[in-house]
Amino acid sequence: MILGVDYDTKNIHIAALGAGVILLNLKRIPVWSPYNEVFHEASKYFFSGSPELVVVEAPIYIQNAKTSFALARVHTIITLACEEAHIKFTTLGATRWKKLAMGEAKVNKEETLKRMRDRFGDDVTDHHFADSIGLALAGKELIAQGLL
């Protein structure tokens, strides 16, 4: 099983790619909750199922310092959860994972959502889920190419 992890300043979204795709949405966990609460909740998904690889989207740093800090904080929590669970993980920027997952680096959010819905069905409800699936697909491709 390969996990793809997308996040924003409010939620963490995980897709588990194995025999099929299982979409997990951690919207219950506000990322501004105390660190230990977010870490504990996120860790449940990394400790259970023993994924072969977790692919995390690289944080985007923008001019708004509060947003940049929030994204870096969530990224750190996710990668620490992986390290704590002794699970291999990698961080990929958007253009890299899109190239690996869809063959093109410059795919916008709407097109990514459409492609993931075409491939995995209407359970792909929003662009965060589409991105998390794309991240998992990129991880699968990295392993297939022997890059991890």
Image (cartoon, grey):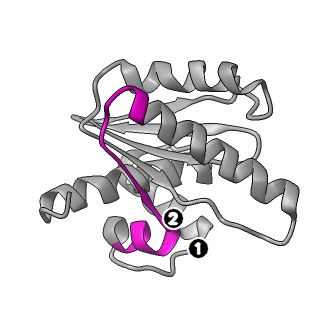
Q: CA distance from mark 1 to mark 2?
A: 6 Å
**Residues in magenta, as a range:** 83-99
Q: Nearer the viewer, residue 79 or 109?
A: 79
Q: Which mark is residue 112?
A: 2
Q: Please tell me which residue is depicted at 51% across the width and 64% down the height of the picture.
A: 112
Find numbered disc 2 in the image and state the secondary structure of the residue it sits on: helix
**Is 75 above or below relative to 93?**
above
At which x and y percent is residue 43? Answer: 49, 23
- The N terminus, quarter of image: top left
At which x and y percent is residue 15? Answer: 44, 39
In the drawing, does residue 29 fall left or right of residue 18?
right
**In which quadrant of the rendered view does residue 28 lie?**
top right
Q: Please tell me which residue is depicted at 49% across the width and 42% down the height of the picture.
A: 79
In the drawing, does residue 88 fall left or right of residue 81?
left
Determine whether label 1 and label 2 are within 8 Å by CB: yes
Identify residue type, mark 1: Asn
Q: Which mark is residue 108?
A: 1
**In which quadrant of the rendered view does residue 60 lie?**
bottom right
**Is 110 above or below relative to 38?**
below
Residue 91 among magenta residues = yes
Identify residue type, mark 2: Thr
- The C terminus, quarter of image: bottom left
